[in-house]
Structure formats: structure tokens, C-alpha cells
Amino acid sequence: MKVAVLGAQGFIGSNICSSLKIEGHCVTTFTNVSVDNIVGKVKVGDFDWILNFAGRTLVIESFSDAIGVYKKNIEIALAAMQMASAAGAILLNTSSYVYGRVDHPPALETDKLNSSNPYMGSKIAIERILTDLSNQLDVGLVTIRPSNIYGYGQRKGMLISSLLQSGQDHNEVVLNDPDPKRDYLYIADFCRLIALLLESGSRLIGETFNVGSGVSHSNYEVAQLVRQHLSVEAPVKIIGNRRAADILDGSLNITKIKAAVDWEPQYSLAEGVIESIKGESVL
């Protein structure tokens, strides 16, 4: 298939590009896209799929520059929709965990959307905008809501990458808040899922899917795993700084995506951490 990837220079996008090329897909990468600079660069038949992995993704950064995060992420999403419309392609919108605090976790796709930070708010806004535009422009749209994809090469600022760097550089594992629970998905499992989504063609148009491992772990459990596999003797160092309006349980129900494409995560968190420590790409 002919696939355009936005955000190909990032951790997720670069891994997706490598994986799809291995699978035999024709991959074209785009960086720094906007509605203005993409005009005239895409025509009907150029692509079968537009995959959008671009944007500003750091939650902590979104608190200090909320308007900038909204502006950048929405602009990229609009450019991706414009490309899909011009090419007659299906658009894969990569959202995020968008449920805020759920009364009865794990979160289902049908649960109410609720923003707990500006980054999450930008993703909720994008879902609504793209759904509206897909109907107006007759563009096939598939939305995924992945949670905490990790692996070798991920930049510092995410929990697992920060814990690994702390352990490797300073022989200690430092943690702000031990309590919040999250669903973590290893990058190789995510790449395999994307390949299956592409193979599904138009069958999944209009659908939205949670994407994760289906298993949640507390920050402390993750830190202990990192400590164990890095052979750090010192106990986990807890600073005790809870992020404003943080979600205490971000677990996801992934039953829908598993059934839709016959996909099952293969890596446990421990196995994914070990692969990340090895410092080698699995692709």
C-alpha cells in the first residue's frame, strides 16, 4: 500500500515507517506539515492511507503552553485531513487517552470524554473536528486512542524512558508519584497493530479504538521493574510531587480492537522493559 506518515522523525513515527517498509509498503514521510504548505503537494491516488503521529505530546509542556499545544496539534490534524481528502485516502487519527477520571475503569470507547490537561483537551477537540470534516469531505476516518507507547529510542520526559535514563546514568531510580496506574504498550506490538489496521482497508472506517496492553501498572510497579532489570541496589527514590489534576487510574479496555483485527499484545511490561534496556530496535 501507499502510505504517508506524518511525524516520521519521532519515536513512534520512525518505528512505524521502518516496520511498514519491512512489510513491503511504499512509505512517504512528511515533516513540519501545515494546511498552507501541503496545498498542491498531494493528488488523487497518491496514497491509500495517511497516518498522523505528529504533534506536541508532552503533558507537562501542555500546562505551560496550552494555547501553543492546541494550535500545533489542531493545525497538523487539519493538514492530515486535507491530505486525505486530496488523495482520496483513509486517515488514521492518533488520539490518546481522553477519558480523564473514569468512575469504573478500565475505560471503554463509549465512556464520556473528559480532559484533565491541555494535551488531552487538544486530542478531544481534534477528534470532534475530524469527525465533522470526515462527514463533510467524505473522507474515511479511523481513530485510535493509544496509551503510553514505549521502547528503545523514546525521548526523556515519558515515565519509562526517564526511569531508564535515571537508573543508567545515576544508578538510582527516581519517581515523582508512585500511585497513578497506566496502561503501557511496547512499540513492537503497536507497529504490528498498525500493519493490521492498514490491511483492514475500509472495513474499520468510522470506528474508534482504545489501544494498549489491557493491563495497568502503578508508577511504583514500573519503577521497581526498571530497578530490578538495571540491577540498581538502592531502593526507588520517591520525591512525592503529584501532578495537578493527575489521573489515578488510566487503564483501558481493549476488547474492541482485539476483536476487530485479531490482535493481541505479545510483550509483557517486563519483557518490553528488558528490550528497551538492551538498546536495540526490534524491527
Image (spheres, rainbow, N blue to C red):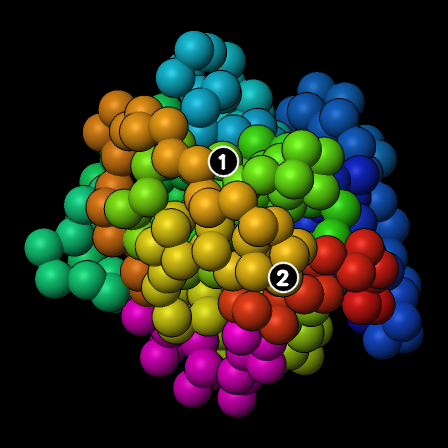
Image point 64% across, 57% down: which residue? 231
Query: Element type at marker 1?
Result: strand
Query: Which mark sits nearer the N-terminus, 1 or 2?
Result: 1
* Disc 1 target residue: 174
Whether residue 7 is visible = no
In the image, the segment drawn in magenta is 253-268
Callout 1 environment at 10 Å: few (<14), some (14 to 19), or many (20+)? many
Q: Is residue 220 above or below residue 2?
A: above
Image point 68% across, 25% down: which residue? 34
Q: Could you tell me residue 43's position as x and y percent?
A: 81, 46
> Hey, which residue is sitting farthest front in the picture?
233
Which part of the image, by quadrant, shows the C terminus? bottom right
In the figure, residue 114 lies in which quadrant?
top left
Q: Is residue 276 above or below residue 203?
A: above
Q: Could you tell me residue 117's position as x and y percent?
A: 32, 28
Kindly identify the amino acid type of the residue bearing the numbered disc 2.
His
Q: Could you tell me residue 30's position as x and y percent?
A: 81, 38
Q: Is residue 256 above or below residue 273?
A: below
Whether residue 263 is visible = yes
* Disc 2 target residue: 229
The disc label shown at residue 90, or none: none
> Hey, which residue is sitting farthest left in the picture?
103
